[in-house]
């Protein structure tokens, strides 16, 4: 094998590797935090999931699915956008006082929202977007009215 043939072979192999890697990175994801499913007829959020199959909801009382934070509150469920309205950091759920604190804490962060999605402290300028919930057996529907 001469030098030109060697370089061409290495170049083709590297090119194929880069192509396959790029195509893999561009493919879709099956994670639970995919974009929120919308009803094609209305363009509104509308998805359903089995609450018994969600380990976070069962063990912690809250979960994030389809970019919505869903929390168990007594016998009902609360659902809001899953990110803080300040800078888009993820929210968590505090079951002791039924609040949704921003995961980013510090002097410039720390927004907290009440069980109605209303900002009660912190730099967030707006309240959370609220979704309706409807439980049917083990299936919880999260949707915009």
Image: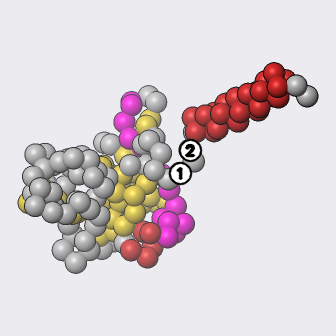
Q: Residue 75 at what x, y percent from top left?
A: 33, 71
The total of numbered circles placed on residues is: 2
Q: Are marks 1 and 2 in contact (CB under 8 Å)?
A: yes
Q: Residue 13 at what x, y percent from top left?
A: 76, 32
* The residue positioned farthest toward the top in the image shown: 4
Comparing 98 with 86, the one in front is: 86
| Mark 2 element type | loop
Q: Residue 20 at what x, y percent from top left?
A: 69, 35
Q: Residue 72 at what x, y percent from top left?
A: 34, 68
In this image, 7 relative to 61: left or right? right
Residue receiving disc 1: 31
The image's colour scheme reads secondary structure
Residue at 29% over, 64% down: 92
Position of the N terminus by quadrant: top right
* Residue 47 lies in the magenta stretch: yes
Q: Is residue 135 above or below residue 83?
A: below
Q: Is residue 139 above or below residue 18?
A: below
Q: Quadrant of residue 122?
A: bottom left
In this image, 74 relative to 140: left or right? left
In this image, 112 relative to 37: left or right? left
Residue receiving disc 2: 29
Range of residues picked out in magenta: 42-55
Residue at 40% over, 58% down: 64
Position of the C terminus by quadrant: top left
Dot 2: few (<14), some (14–19), or many (≥20) neighbours within 10 Å? few
Can residue 130 be seen here? The reply is: no
Q: Quadrant of residue 9?
A: top right
């Amino acid at each position: 094998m001469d030098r030109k043939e060697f370089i061409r072979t290495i170049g083709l192999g590297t090119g194929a590797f880069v192509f396959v890697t790029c195509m893999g990175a561009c493919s879709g994801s099956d994670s639970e935090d995919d974009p929120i499913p919308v009803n094609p007829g209305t363009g509104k959020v509308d998805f359903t999931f089995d609450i018994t199959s969600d380990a976070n909801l069962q063990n912690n009382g809250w979960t994030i699915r389809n970019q919505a934070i869903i929390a168990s509150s007594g016998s009902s469920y609360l659902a809001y956008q899953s990110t803080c309205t300040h800078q888009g950091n993820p929210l968590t759920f505090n079951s002791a006082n039924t609040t949704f604190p921003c995961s980013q804490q510090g002097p410039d962060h720390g927004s907290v929202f009440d069980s109605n999605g209303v900002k009660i402290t912190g730099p967030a300028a707006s309240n959370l977007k609220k979704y309706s919930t409807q439980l049917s057996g083990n299936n919880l529907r999260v949707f915009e009215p």
